[in-house]
């Protein structure tokens, strides 16, 4: 049997690394950061404990990677796509991509919220945010430019208010994923900012309940 090529070995390493990160994310979200030992992450990922330590020498390194990916994803939501030329089109795209990303990555959102709020892990979140300061600032500046192009008198304040609204939506979505009225909230956000949108969803908004 011929030896594996360097490309195949690299792909296998990347697969193992992804499995470890996915396992860590799942367990951190389920049991909390402090309640998750490395041995459980290795077991969930289906790899040897030594391999986890090889890629991530400390458990905090796993958090840094996961949160860094989350921050990169937030910035990517502000990347304009083909057809998004005007400020209104760019803002509509940011709303759609942010809400869709949050809905599709509930586990990540829960983890980030926990890390930001819990005293035991808030310092870790601050370290990661500081290490990615350029990414965070670029995200803020892109939003501020959108509001400036829309003629806002205070684009910085508009950016803060916009993020506050979106983060409130994401918080409720992570707490009540089964009963959150995603389509109705999306429609309401578009009307709040005077963006073109079709008729509201016909289904009435029910009560938020945890399942």
Image: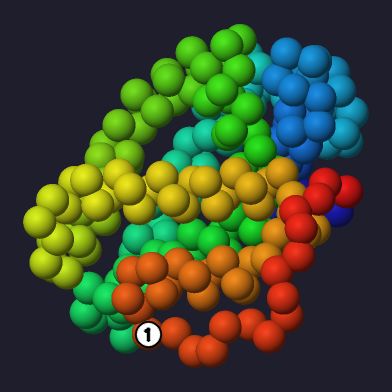
Residue positioned 64% across, 82% down in the render: 201
Residue positioned 81% across, 50% down in the render: 209
Task: Estimate the x, y position of residue 112 in percent, counting from the top left.
Answer: 58, 34
Q: Is residue 186 left or right of residue 56?
A: left
Q: Is residue 49 above or below residue 89?
A: above
Q: Is residue 97 above or below residue 210?
A: below
Name the residue at the top extreme: 120
Q: Is residue 32 above or below residue 142?
A: above
Task: Estimate the x, y position of residue 13 in percent, counting from the top left.
Answer: 68, 41
- The number of numbered badges drawn on the structure is 1
Q: Is residue 33 left or right of residue 192?
A: right
Task: Estimate the x, y position of residue 180 in percent, counting from the top left.
Answer: 70, 59
Task: Estimate the x, y position of residue 98 in percent, counting from the top left.
Answer: 49, 59
Taking depth in this image into account, of 90 and 130 the one nearest to the observer is: 90
* Residue 202 seen in the figure: yes
The quadrant in which residue 183 appears is: bottom right
Q: Is residue 157 left or right of residue 93?
A: left
Residue positioned 35% across, 60% down in the render: 78
SS of the residue at dot 1?
loop
Q: Is residue 53 left or right of residue 115?
A: right
Q: Which residue is mark 1?
A: 196
Taking depth in this image into account, of 42 and 155 the one nearest to the observer is: 155
Taking depth in this image into account, of 205 and 81 the one nearest to the observer is: 205
* Residue 105 seen in the figure: no
Taking depth in this image into account, of 205 and 57 the one nearest to the observer is: 205
Circle 1 crowding by C-alpha within 10 Å: few under 14, some 14–19, many from 20: few
Q: How is the image coloured?
A: rainbow
Name the residue at the bottom extreme: 198
Q: Is residue 18 above or below residue 119?
A: below
Residue positioned 21% across, 63% down in the render: 146
């Amino acid at each position: 049997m011929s030896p594996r090529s360097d490309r195949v070995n690299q792909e296998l390493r990347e697969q193992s690394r992804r499995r470890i990160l996915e396992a860590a994310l799942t367990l951190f979200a389920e049991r909390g950061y402090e309640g998750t030992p490395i041995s459980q992450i290795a077991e969930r990922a289906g790899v040897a404990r030594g391999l986890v330590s090889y890629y991530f020498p400390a458990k905090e390194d796993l958090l840094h990677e996961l949160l860094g990916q989350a921050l990169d994803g937030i910035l990517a939501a502000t990347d304009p796509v083909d057809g998004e030329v005007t400020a209104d089109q760019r803002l509509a795209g940011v709303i759609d991509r942010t809400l869709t990303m949050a809905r599709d990555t509930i586990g990540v959102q829960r983890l980030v919220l926990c890390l930001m709020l819990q005293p035991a892990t808030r310092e870790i979140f601050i370290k990661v945010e500081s290490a990615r300061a350029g990414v965070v600032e670029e995200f803020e500046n892109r939003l501020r430019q959108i509001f400036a192009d829309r003629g806002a008198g205070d684009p910085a304040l508009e950016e803060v208010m916009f993020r506050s609204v979106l983060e409130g939506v994401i918080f409720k979505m992570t707490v009540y994923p089964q009963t959150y009225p995603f389509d109705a909230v999306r429609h309401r956000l578009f009307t709040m900012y005077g963006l073109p949108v079709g008729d509201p969803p016909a289904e009435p908004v029910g009560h938020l309940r945890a399942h």
